[in-house]
Image: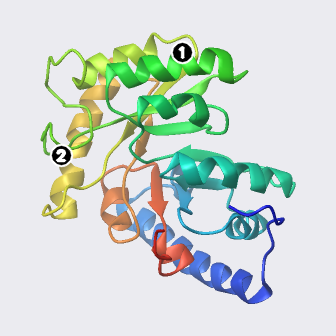
Amino acid sequence: MTDQPATVRPDRRAELAAGLARVRTRIADACAAAGRDRAEVTMIAVTKTYPAGDVVALAGLGVTDVGENRDQEAAPKAAEVAAAGVTARWHFIGQLQRNKARSVVRYADVVHSVDSVRLARALDAAAATGRDRVLETLVQVSIDGDPARGGALPDSADPDRGLERVAEALAGAAGLRLSGLMAVAPLGWEPERAFARLAEVAQRFRERHPEATVLSAGMSGDLEQAIAYGATHVRVGSALLGMRPTLR
């Protein structure tokens, strides 16, 4: 990130407004098709690789839930946005290494990607000294159960990666709040199959953790299917902000 203040070009604001209108229509139509209240679904603008000026512009358009995947980009961007006088609700949605926990807790309001007991403990320890309010957390679920990929494992007694073990670690942490689940449809799976499986996991999960009502699922290409299966938060990047700049 640069030391220059976050600025917004008028033409870029117009582009974002047009993208936002299209995405809001898609979400409203998906909620209507599923018989759900539109107010049940929150859109998170995934702004990885996009400048802080886009976050500022989106806030002016009424979008303050912002998702980031990489701490090395998110931390300075959050600071730049705050320096512009804009308050955003930051969602950390990418794979998180334990050694980044102390940095992430300084700006994140929600961490979506907790998938191990060790990470839960690292976040709790970091939250104890790095923030003055409880950090909301979601357990990332492995839909296909492949331990080689990210995500806690449903129906597993693994002491570090088992879904219920991770949930218990978050629920018992003084500085964290267990708010729900997050998942990404596995490559090669049809969205309906992936989100139907997630809905089954979520139903059983809420029987044990009735306070954990958030279900973060669905992105630009499959948000309709995710909403049909109960997503409360959808993570939208390219459909809102346009083609993503190349990562450097």
At 62% from the left edge and 37% from the top edge, which residue is drawn? 109
**Mark 1 → mark 2, Cα distance in angstroms:** 33 Å
Q: Residues within 10 Å of mark 1 (few under 14, many from 20)?
A: some
Q: Tell me residue 112's x, y (percent).
A: 45, 40
- What residue sits right under mark 2 in the picture? 197
Q: Is residue 233 above or below residue 61?
A: above
> Which sits earlier in the primary sequence, circle 1 or circle 2?
1
What is the number of the mark on residue 205? none
Amino acid type, label 1: Ala
Q: Is residue 206 above or below residue 35?
A: above
Q: Is residue 84 left or right of residue 129?
A: right
Q: Is residue 42 left or right of residue 197?
A: right
Q: Tell me residue 33's x, y (percent).
A: 37, 67
Q: Tell me residue 124's x, y (percent).
A: 52, 17
Q: Nearer the viewer, residue 128 or 191?
A: 128
Q: Residue furthest bottom?
A: 11
Q: Tell me residue 145's x, y (percent).
A: 13, 39
Element at badge 1?
helix
Q: How many marks?
A: 2
Element at badge 2?
helix
Amino acid type, label 2: Arg
Q: Is residue 81 left or right of residue 118?
A: right
